[in-house]
């Protein structure tokens, strides 16, 4: 058993059971008592090539791609590998104001963010991370996506499963954003449907309110992608909500940990980068992917 003391110092989820589950981190996902959805004859098996404890000195690029995989970021936020570091048992993505604007692909970039994407993909399973959001207008996220690359026919479509998308500073006065800095904001998307394919396009949302801001403490964000038409979300080991995706979720998806800018939460007048490095940093203590297998017991 691997003991991970860093979590005991950095988080206060609220119950001894959750902390105990984190200590025995490699045994199963983080669940509070009676929240584990597996059946009695099943067990969770860690998928190592989509999991990481971030205990080295740099990103493990045998598992993760850190330059955007063809996506350079939504302007004005540019993905930059130099904003991603691994230290003290955590991966950190630090936001920054660029010294000078950078023009790429006919778009102007003024802020630096970061992108970490898994090189491997999986269909179904449980996905979780322990994350503390940054305090800026830029995002802190954890999600899954199939981009349709190298696929054919009706599988060449996009499915996206957003486990957590949040910001530390809300600049938009829209009613739907008023709790975006103190909620687990989840979504299921279906888009880019090939012509002639009978799949719905759209989004079905879910979420849960926290006691405090997303940057106040570490939280465990999890999702059980149970089947093609059932997705269950968990916050700090507790079931939050269940969603039926707008179209069949039966194509393998890859993990994403991304800090970016949104066109619906624009940079404030002062640039939004006046805080300390810690305030401008999204921290991931770990990320874990699990699959259900039959128990031999």
Image (cartoon, grey):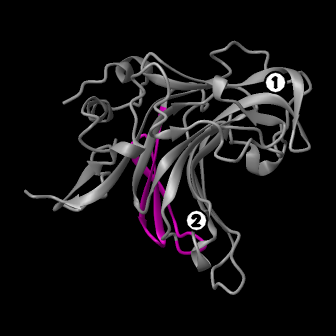
Q: Nearer the viewer, residue 288 or 243?
A: 288
Q: Which residue is mark 1?
A: 272
Q: Is residue 28 left or right of residue 215?
A: left
Q: Which mark is residue 106?
A: none
Which residue corresponds to the image point at 44% horizontal and 15% vertical from the top-left?
88
Q: Nearer the viewer, residue 120 or 168?
A: 120
Q: CA distance from mark 1 to mark 2?
A: 39 Å
Q: Quick one: which residue is furthest to the left in this view?
A: 297
Which residue corresponds to the image point at 77% horizontal and 38% vertical from the top-left?
261
Q: Identify the mark nearer the N-term, 1 or 2.
A: 2
Mark 1 neighbour density, 10 Å: few (under 14) some (14–19) many (20 or more): many
Q: Is residue 80 left or right of residue 124?
A: right
Q: Which residue is mark 2?
A: 150
Answer with the quarter of the image where residue 92 lies: top right
Q: Main secondary structure of the magenta part?
A: strand
Q: Which residues are magenta?
A: 219-248
């Amino acid at each position: 058993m691997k003991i991970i003391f860093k979590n005991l110092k950095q988080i206060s989820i609220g119950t001894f059971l959750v902390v105990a589950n984190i200590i025995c981190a490699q045994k199963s996902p983080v669940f509070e008592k009676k929240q584990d959805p597996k059946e009695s004859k099943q067990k969770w098996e860690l998928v190592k090539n989509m999991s990481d404890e971030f205990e080295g000195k740099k990103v493990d690029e045998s598992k993760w791609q850190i330059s955007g995989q063809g996506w350079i970021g939504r302007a004005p936020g540019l993905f930059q590998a130099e904003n991603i570091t691994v230290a003290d048992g955590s991966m950190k993505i630090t936001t920054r104001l660029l010294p000078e604007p950078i023009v790429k692909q006919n778009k102007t970039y003024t802020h630096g963010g970061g992108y970490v994407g898994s090189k491997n993909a999986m269909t179904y399973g449980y996905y979780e991370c322990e994350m503390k959001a940054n305090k800026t207008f830029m995002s802190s996220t954890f999600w899954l996506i199939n981009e349709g690359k190298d696929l054919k026919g009706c599988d060449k479509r996009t499915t996206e499963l957003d486990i957590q998308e949040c910001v530390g500073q809300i600049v938009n006065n829209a009613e739907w954003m008023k709790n975006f800095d103190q909620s687990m904001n989840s979504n299921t998307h279906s888009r880019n449907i090939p012509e002639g394919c009978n799949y719905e396009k759209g989004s079905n949302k879910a979420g849960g309110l926290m006691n405090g801001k997303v940057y106040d403490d570490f939280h465990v964000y999890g999702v059980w992608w149970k089947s093609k038409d059932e997705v269950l979300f968990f916050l700090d080991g507790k079931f939050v909500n269940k969603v039926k995706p707008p179209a069949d979720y039966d194509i393998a998806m890859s993990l994403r940990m991304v800090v970016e800018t949104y066109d619906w939460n624009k940079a404030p007048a002062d640039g939004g980068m006046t805080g300390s490095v810690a305030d401008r940093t999204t921290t991931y203590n770990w990320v874990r992917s699990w699959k259900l297998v039959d128990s031999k017991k």
